[in-house]
Image (tube, rainbow, N blue to C red):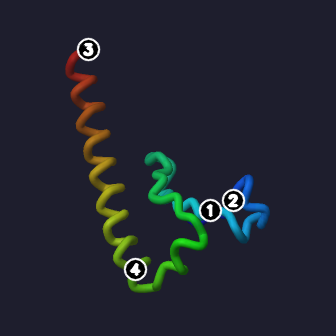
Amino acid sequence: RKRRFGARGKGKGKRGGYRVITYYAAIDIPVFMLALVDKGERADISQGDRNALRVELAQIAEDYRRGTKAKVNQLRRTK
């Protein structure tokens, strides 16, 4: 997801603000903040970049799930 925020002191509202790029995979995974970018610093993300990022993020989500399950199982064994 991409969110836009105005920057105080720039006087341009959202046009002169920032982009916050986040990733939401599912309810069992936290929202990851990927980037905070000055809107004047970078153009839109290309479709190719988005596709590559989608593959990487799916792997991050799967790794998170696997790590969380392992931690829960470890905690259950210690009780």
Relative to residue 40, is residue 34 depicted above or below? Answer: above
Real-space Cα separation, disc 1 to disc 4, in angstroms: 19 Å
At label 2, the amino acid type is Phe
Closer to the chain start, of discs 1 and 2, is 2
Where in the figure is residue 65, as x and y percent of width and height? 32, 48
The label nearer to you, 2 versus 4, is 2
Q: Which mark is residue 5?
A: 2
Relative to residue 29, is residue 57 depicted above or below? Answer: below
Closer to the chain start, of discs 3 and 4, is 4
Identify the residue position indicated by label 3 in the image.
79
Real-space Cα separation, disc 1 to disc 3, in angstroms: 47 Å
Real-space Cα separation, disc 1 to disc 2, in angstroms: 5 Å
The label nearer to you, 1 versus 4, is 1
Where in the figure is residue 5, as x and y percent of width and height? 69, 59
Q: Quadrant of the C terminus?
A: top left
At label 1, the amino acid type is Tyr
Closer to the chain start, of discs 1 and 4, is 1
Q: Quadrant of the N terminus?
A: bottom right
Real-space Cα separation, disc 2 to disc 4, in angstroms: 23 Å
Identify the residue position indicated by label 4 in the image.
49
At label 4, the amino acid type is Asp
Real-space Cα separation, disc 3 to disc 4, in angstroms: 45 Å
Identify the residue position indicated by label 1 in the image.
18
